Image (cartoon, grey):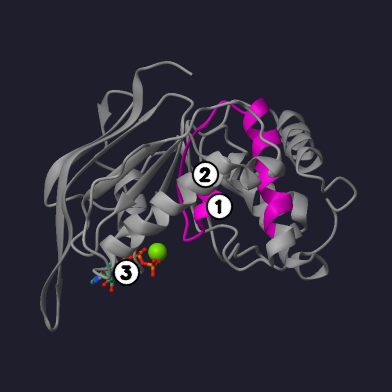
Amino acid sequence: MTDTPLIEIRDVSHTFHTESGPLPVLDNLSLSVADGGFCAVVGPSGCGKSTLTRLVAGLMKPDTGSVWLHGEQVRSPRATVGMAFQNPVLLEWRSILRNVLLPLEIVPTKLTRKQQEDRARHLLTLVGLDGFEDKKPSELSGGMRQRASLCRALIHQPEVLILDEPFGALDAFTREDLWQTMHQVKAQEPFTSLLITHDLREAIFLADQVVVLSGRPATSQYVMNVPSTGPRDLEALYTPDAADRLAILRHQIQVAQGRKPARREAAQ
Ligand SMILES: Nc1ncnc2c1ncn2[C@@H]1O[C@H](COP(=O)(O)OP(=O)(O)OP(=O)(O)O)[C@@H](O)[C@H]1O
Ligand SMILES: [Mg+2]
């Protein structure tokens, strides 16, 4: 990991114009993620987190401010971004392997057909899905489908991996399994991550930076750096340090929801 920010969001503001009038969603939001970094974004429901991911992916432009990837301003959709969502939306008429290969039919690639398949099989093995390449999505559990969706997001070796609540629909144990899988994948694939989540434990387990957004229109309300120690053990979530971090983040979320007044935190 270097100190050069790979993702930079500078003073971004955005308002949607809806039938019931203007809806300011983002307000002077700035955020930066180091090359190889893992940033988790948490904030009240409806505050603008998914909107933020669409801006980073170049799927929409902000009214004011700018988004930069690797020092280049994002003005249109980027092939160097991979995305995974809460609902994996795999195509039922394709095998798992062919679902994972799908982005390579859209994004230009220098890989031969054989190399593409080898990479897909490698990723499926990495997430524990070897032997399921020829199954259809409906033959897999929810957690397995989410693993396949992660492989699909990574197949074209994206610089940036955007995860919008990818584990939100899974049960707690499956979710924890996937957190560990994420660490294993991250140790092998050199992407920079932006993770949207409602789960504070997930945020501190996976990320080296947690950004709490305020209520809508969202701005960066609080930033917590989590010392990066590489792959983490689930036990790390039960230490006094983790308990302190979760208490601070929980408080910040309550402030963002307008349920608690802001007060100075003693420690980060
Ligand atoms: N294309 C759009 N047109 C109009 N309003 C929109 C559009 N997209 C999002 N919104 C509104 O903008 C606000 C922020 O939406 P967004 O999906 O970014 O929130 P979020 O933080 O991801 O919410 P959640 O935590 O529930 O996923 C919401 O009030 C939503 O209704
Ligand atoms: Mg959302």
How many other residues sit within 10 Å of disc 3, few (<14), some (14-19) or many (≥20)? few
Where on the picture, by quarter, is residue 233? Answer: top right
Left of 23 or right of it: where is 257?
Answer: right
Q: Which mark is residue 201?
A: 1
Q: Are marks 2 and 1 in contact (CB under 8 Å)?
A: yes
Measured as percent of width and height from the top left, residue 106 is found at 52, 45
For residue 187, say whether it is visible: yes
Nearest the eye: 265 or 119:
265
Left of 135 or right of it: where is 52?
Answer: left
Q: Which residues are magenta?
A: 175-203
Q: Is residue 237 magenta?
A: no
Disc 2 or 3, which lies upstream in sequence? 3
Image region (quadrant) for ligand 2: bottom left
In this rendering, the label closer to the viewer, 2 or 3: 2
Q: Is mark 3 within 8 Å of ligand 1?
A: yes
How many other residues sit within 10 Å of disc 2, few (<14), some (14-19) or many (≥20)? many
Nearest the eye: 230 or 156:
230
Q: Amino acid at mark 2?
A: Ile
Q: Residue tagged by mark 2?
A: 204
Measured as percent of width and height from the top left, residue 211 is found at 35, 45
How many other residues sit within 10 Å of disc 1, few (<14), some (14-19) or many (≥20)? some
